[in-house]
Amino acid sequence: MSAEPQPFAFPVLVGDIGGTNARFAVIPDAGSAVERIPNLGTADFDSITDAMEAGLAGRDGPPPRTAILALAGPIVGDRVPLTNCDWVVEPLVLMDRFGFGEVLLLNDFEAQSLALPGLEPADLDPIGTGTATPTGARVVVGPGTGLGAGALIHIRDMWVPIPGEGGHIDLGPVSARDFELWPHLEFTFGRMSAETLLSGPGLLRLYKAVCSSNGVPAPHDDEAHVTAAGLSGNDPAAAEALQLFATYLGRFAGDLAMVFAAHGGVYLAGGIPVRITPALKSGAFRQAFLAKQPHDDLLEGIATAIIVKRDAALGGIGDYARRPQDFGVELAGRRWSA
């Protein structure tokens, strides 16, 4: 692991850029709370530069000297395309345009994992029983425009985030109902990845597959309508789609819990888990999470919860900006300095 930097130069601009929303905030100094900038829709701007210009335009105070940005996609090279958005992030261009002395790029769920040590009980809505050990490995999963996943490991008195693209692993049928539905599902990139189903578009795919399998019309045409109809209890197909979504998310989260022996807990991030909380707490998620024989006893002791704290990823980046010595963040190939 590369050496940690000297303390970051403040003010620090922090950002969490996903497929749909770009969230920014400014931290004036190491002792200050974040100054939140209103959400910006990625579809409303041609580039991240345009979005940042709009976000910073009405701000008072000295301009940011450092930018730490979390992106939905792998960080490779000087031109970083986002996975579910047309933007390409070029740190050298950002430094030239905004005068940053330093730009650091993180994976978006690396940033989500950085937030985990700072979460309080009020920031979490538990699902089922289980106990999080203080220094146990932790996993964060977030279905949204796509599906993100990350882990956090405690080593040598530091929290080390493990970025990756776990949302793109394969997902296969397990139950008899799964095998009925699979021929009706729309595949992506010629395969069935976890993100194909465990995302906003994925919930719509599930709903359409349920309707097709049952031989009934599918009147809802977006994830929000499917969610509302499923939670109302008046639409059996939408309700089943939500239950299947909770089941598959439980399977996926349970797999990652086993990979990392996540005794520090598994946490669901983003807007979708908050919106479908009743479906996640109905029992389907936790039942699928535990169904990992012969290791169901291992999973039984692992806590699962929904993160209800707003802008948790920005908070995690802020914690890192103030105390970089507490986190073992890999910097090689992801840090640009003047």
Image (cartoon, helix red, strand yellow):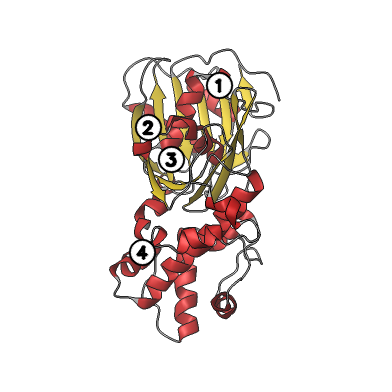
- For label 1, the residue is 326
Distance from disc 4 to disc 2, alpha carbons, whole Å, reads 31 Å
Q: Nearer the viewer, mark 4 or mark 2?
A: 4
Q: Are marks 3 and 2 in contact (CB under 8 Å)?
A: yes
- For label 4, the residue is 227
Q: Secondary structure at mark 1?
A: helix
* Residue 217 image point, x, y percent: 40, 82
Q: Give the mark nearest the N terminus, 4 or 3.
A: 3
- For label 3, the residue is 22
Q: Secondary structure at mark 4?
A: helix
The residue carrying pointer 2 sits among few (fewer than 14), some (14 to 19) or many (20 or more) residues within 10 Å by Cα, namely some
Q: Please determine whether, in this image, residue 178 is positioned above or below residue 217.
A: above
Q: Please determine whether, in this image, residue 185 is positioned above or below residue 10.
A: below
Q: Nearer the viewer, mark 1 or mark 2?
A: 1
Q: Please determine whether, in this image, residue 102 is positioned above or below residue 152.
A: above
Residue 55: mark in rendering: 2
Q: Are marks 4 and 2 in contact (CB under 8 Å)?
A: no
Q: Residue at x 37, y 32 (%)?
A: 55
The residue carrying pointer 3 sits among few (fewer than 14), some (14 to 19) or many (20 or more) residues within 10 Å by Cα, namely many
Residue sticking out furthest to the right: 1
